Amino acid sequence: MNWLALLALSTLLAACGGGGGDPTLDGGSGGGGTAGAVPSTLAIGLLNVTGQVSNTISGSAPLTVRALVLDKNGAGVSNALVTFTVDANLVALTPGNGTALTDAKGVATVTMRPASNAVSGAGKVTASVTTAGVTVSGDANYQIAATVASKASISVALLSATGSASNALSSSSPLTAVAAVKDQDGKLLPNALVVFAADNTLATLSPSAGSALSDANGEARVILRPVSLAVGGAGTLTAAVILNGVTSTSAINFVVGATTLNFGNIVFDTPSLDAYGSTQVSLDVLSNGVKYTDQSLAVNFSSSCVAAGKATFANVVQTANGSARAVYRDQGCGVSDVILATASGVTSSRSATLQIAAPQVASIQFYSAIPADKSIVIKGQGGLLRSESATLKFRVFDTFNNPLPGLIVRFAKTDENADIGLSPLYGTTDVNGEVTTSVMSGSTPLSFRIQAKIDNTNVSTLSDSIVVSTGTPVQKAFSIAISDSNVEGWTIDANGATPSALVTVAMGDKFGNPVADGTPVVFQSNIGVVGSASRGGCNSINGSCTVDFRAQAPRNPAANTPATVCNGSLGSSDNPRTGVATICASTSDGTATPIFAKTNFFISGSSPGTIFLNGGTVLTSGSVVNDLGPVNWNVPLVFSLQINDVNNNPMPSGTIVEVANIVRAASGGVSPATVQKTFPDRSVPPATYQGTSHLVTITSPAGQPCTPGVATFNVNVTTPHLLTTSYPFKLTFTCQ
């Protein structure tokens, strides 16, 4: 530092105060500072960026705070920690903690700036150092000069596509808006946000947000285009930029000229189409007689065939190089189609007619019948689920197997004398190519077919056969059957989920045809339960219906109880035999006389009652052995057993009869090995014992020499419910 600066700084330090000592800021009269010396004085000074003494600070002009620490000999104290303190609301220090070490000359410095651009006023900075419990300090006053915010400048210009200045805007001549941004010193200002605005009824901006950042040259750009081809008038474009909270703007006027556009002719690559053919459709957009290529326009196409779903064609096509092109594809329209084109900004529409050939008829097919089983009843016999008429549906197809609408189809009976009605005699196919007619039964059962023929062609088809039957049951064609004739149920109830047997009624009309579906049948039983929880009967399907029978109480009914049509004046008494059940089924043909039938079957016991040996001897079970006497070793013994249940009826069907536990003999088997299905005896008077007979064969052991002696075995009788009764036997083999 030159001597003038030192003199000025010494004068300022003397004015600002501080500790005593040598005022020479370069380290006193001595040379280098003394490390570890005890500070005696601290002098503080303020310097601007040029090193001149100053006490005025601003955002653009920070101050350096300089503290000189001297010992008692006037020598600088090095490596001493100096702490600077200020009003943080006014200024900020760098480094931020406000501390610095003295250098070799005893000098420590920090930088001081205003806390913000908005702050103003005066304050004091204090520097202090403490060593060995001794603190010395100094301070200096400063003032803050208000910061003047910098302000940007902006200018906007409009340029044509060639880069020359222009304010004439049209659809064919968009303009580029260029905003030049500079700071208050006239320097280019990059990365500044510029916002453009214009009358949105006249022009649009691109990008649509209307904003852009200035580039390295300080320029921001947007594209200006007319809102539409037809718009005209004058407007103002404004560009604005904000810097340090200050907004700068610039504006420029422009004029919009309307563009007149019209359509050329619609051109078809193929002016006449075959059915289901296709062609390209082309249309030019013109301005002053030449293609308009400045921007792409949306051309709207429409036609009646497309609207009806009989052709495909793009609804909206964008122009490319001034032309709109799309492919029209016929889907069975069959008539000339008018193509209409419109577009926003084009003065008028354009239309053209495309000739389209009608599809050719290929076939007519029988499609369906209601009722689906193609069966109706004779006139006067209709009712629930019984129809006296049928609806027949046919479909017409073209050569591409697509349905053909609008064709007349005529109907006729293949047998002109068939006793049926037919109406209507002709019809027109709908959009699905469908046409229907109805047939009505007469008084005669028969089978017939209907012909459908396309008018003015040789294309025809036949319906499936339709059957007319009486549909009502007759007594002679009413029968009842049960799936099991000897049910195990005298002492055992049927499982609720598994019936003991199924009872089926079959019904026909007087012509031997099944009755109409839905014919109701009711059932009654004097033993057990017949039918279901919801109803005691069933409705026929294809002439028959089936219900469950469940063995349970009652098992000993009173005579002809319950009273039924089967045991009434038109029928006969129920079978009175113990263990025989009677089920009655009945229906009606619509007259006062019921139609009915009944069936008898056994409710068999689960253990044998009486077993006859060879038709005479009654067997015993348990521990008493049935002795068959002497038997020749070389001659098989064959004997019969008639097995009756506790009511002298057959054992349950499926009961197994077998030889078991045989000793010193061999079994030749039992025939039949199971109890067969057996219905009650209808002879008068009926047999007392109606059990089934089984042949049992016993032989000597195969391949062994004659050995006289006693052989033993059991005959076991096991029912379907696995209840077994055993009968012991013995015989004596002889060798003679």
Image (cartoon, rainbow, N blue to C red):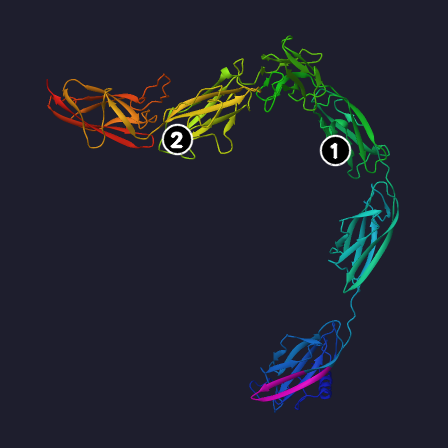
Measured as percent of width and height from the top left, residue 243 is found at: 77, 63
Amino acid type at circle 2 is: Arg
Q: Nearer the viewer, residue 495 or 324?
A: 495
Q: Earlier in the sequence, mark 2 or mark 1?
A: 1
Q: Is residue 139 magenta?
A: yes
* 190 or 351: nearer the viewer: 351
Under tag 1, what secondary structure?
loop
For residue 264, say whether it is visible.
Answer: no
Image height of 475 relative to 348, above or below? above
In the image shown, does 17 or 453 lie closer to the viewer? 453
**733 in the magenta segment:** no
Circle 1 crowding by C-alpha within 10 Å: few under 14, some 14–19, many from 20: some
Residue 555 — which label?
2
Q: Which residues are magenta?
A: 126-141
130 relative position to 670: left or right: right
Horizontal relation, residue 368 to residue 153: left or right: left
Q: Which residue is mark 1?
A: 315
Q: Is residue 22 above or below residue 367?
A: below
Q: Type of residue at label 1? A: Asn
**Residue at x 81%, y 51% (from the top left corner):** 177
Q: Is residue 386 among what the camera can see?
A: yes
